[in-house]
Image (cartoon, helix red, strand yellow):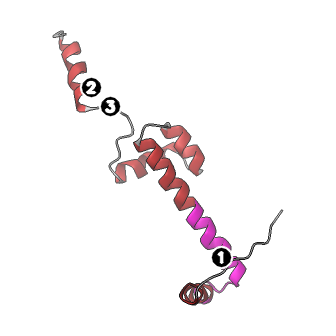
Amino acid sequence: MATTISVRLDKSLLKDLSAIERNWQADRSEAIRRLLAKAINSWKLQYAVEKLREHKISVGKAAEECGISIWEMLDILKENTINWTGYSKEDLERDLKVLEGKD
């Protein structure tokens, strides 16, 4: 069920919105819905990436919250050089010593 909302826009934002409407050949409601959907998806992604950076959620959960595949989420993390594993250089060195039998 759709809900109607109202919003006040300053003149510069309204001017930009009108340009988008013309470009998309869409009415104001359609343009606002499309822009809002894009902004919400962007926010979800940024929020999930931040939670991943802080090791608060898994990659699978982040992908699910964003409505994308795990592979897409991993690509995004790689593009932004985000360490989502929580596996540090020190962890690697410790594990290598264990494997070499120098524990």
Does the magenta run of residues contain 32?
yes
Q: Residue at x 56, y 66 (%)?
A: 39
Residues under labels 2 and 3: Cα distance? Answer: 6 Å
Give percent across and percent down for residue 12: 53, 88
Which callout, 1 or 3, points at the residue further toward the start of the chain?
1
Report which residue position mark 3 lands on: 87
Residues under labels 2 and 1: Cα distance? Answer: 48 Å
Amino acid type, mark 3: Tyr
The quarter in which the N terminus is drawn is bottom right
Residue 31 visible? The answer is: yes
Q: Which mark is residue 91?
A: 2
Q: Which mark is residue 8?
A: none
Report which residue position mark 1 lands on: 32
Give percent across and percent down for residue 53: 40, 43
Residue 72 visible? The answer is: no
Q: Residue at x 15, y 10 (%)?
A: 102
Crowd tier of the residue under label 2, counting other residues whose Cα lies within 10 Å: few below 14, some 14–19, many 20 or above: few
